[in-house]
Amino acid sequence: MAALPALPKGGPVSTHNPANYVVCVKCRVPLDRHELPLPTGPTRVLWTHPVHRQESHPAEPVFAHETGGEVVTSCDFCFSCLPKWLYRCASFVIGGYGSEGNWAACTSCHTLLVVRDYAGLVERALATGPDVGSFEPTLRHDLTLLFATFDQHRLGGPVPLD
């Protein structure tokens, strides 16, 4: 697998640009980035399907524009389909997980984001995501931390997606 070039810091600033997404070449779903520190120094980047996707194949990362096809997008907060809003965000790493630039939001999550109701956003993500069983307390904690970090890295207000 070829190494992917670094994405621009903060991602696209003025528009939602799915061509810059790193997606799986097989299913065209945007992939999650994980940074794993190596004992010898540099960090290893691992790309995986989002936890809410139950894919039967390993992730094969490419930039979306290399696939020549549609990108299957979802809300970055609750995983529902058809995001309608873009939140500009600087890239960040937290607990080994990397966020590359902007986040997309569905209308319901956008409503919570406008008033910065992150507790409500965590509840929505847990309610609409897959059943996590006994991992719910850990996931609740991780989402709370992730959304707080997202808030610290936001770059301005929401932008409607076309």
Image: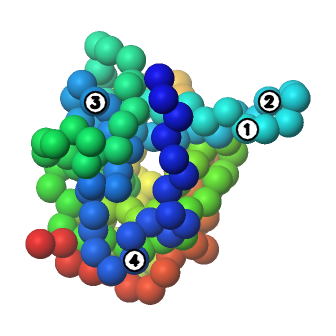
Callout 2: SS: loop
State how far apart marks 3 and 1 are (Cα): 23 Å
CB under 8 Å between discs 2 and 1: yes
User: What residue is rendered at 40% in x and 77% in y?
Assistant: 13
Q: Point out residue 159 in the picture as x, y percentages from the top left corner.
A: 27, 80
C-alpha distance separating marks 2 and 3: 27 Å
Q: Using the numbered discs, state the Cα–Cα distance from disc 2 to disc 1 in whole angstroms.
A: 6 Å
Q: Pick the residue in front: 59 or 78.
A: 59
* Label 2 with label 3: CB-CB less than 8 Å: no
Figure coloring: rainbow
Q: Which residue is mark 4?
A: 13
> Mark 3 is on which residue type?
Val
> Pointer 4 and pointer 1: residues touching (CB < 8 Å)?
no
Horizontal side, residue 106 vs residue 90: left or right: left
> Are discs 3 and 1 less than 8 Å apart at CB?
no
At x 54%, y 52%, the residue is 6
Q: Separation of disc 4 and disc 2 at Cα?
A: 32 Å
- Mark 4 vs mark 2: which is more N-terminal? 4
- Position of the C terminus, as image quadrant, is bottom left
Residue 101 in view, yes or no: yes
Residue extending farthest top:
56
* SS of the residue under disc 1: strand
Residue 161: give x, y in percent of width and height: 18, 72
Amino acid type at image mark 1? Thr
Counting from the top left corner in percent of width and height, residue 81 is at: 17, 49
Are the residues flagged by discs 4 and 2 in contact, CB closer than 8 Å?
A: no
Which residue position holds label 1?
A: 43
Rendered residue at 64%/53% (across/down):
93
Q: Which residue is mark 2?
A: 38
Residue farthest to the right, as pictured: 40
Q: Earlier in the sequence, mark 4 or mark 1?
A: 4
- Residue for badge 3: 25
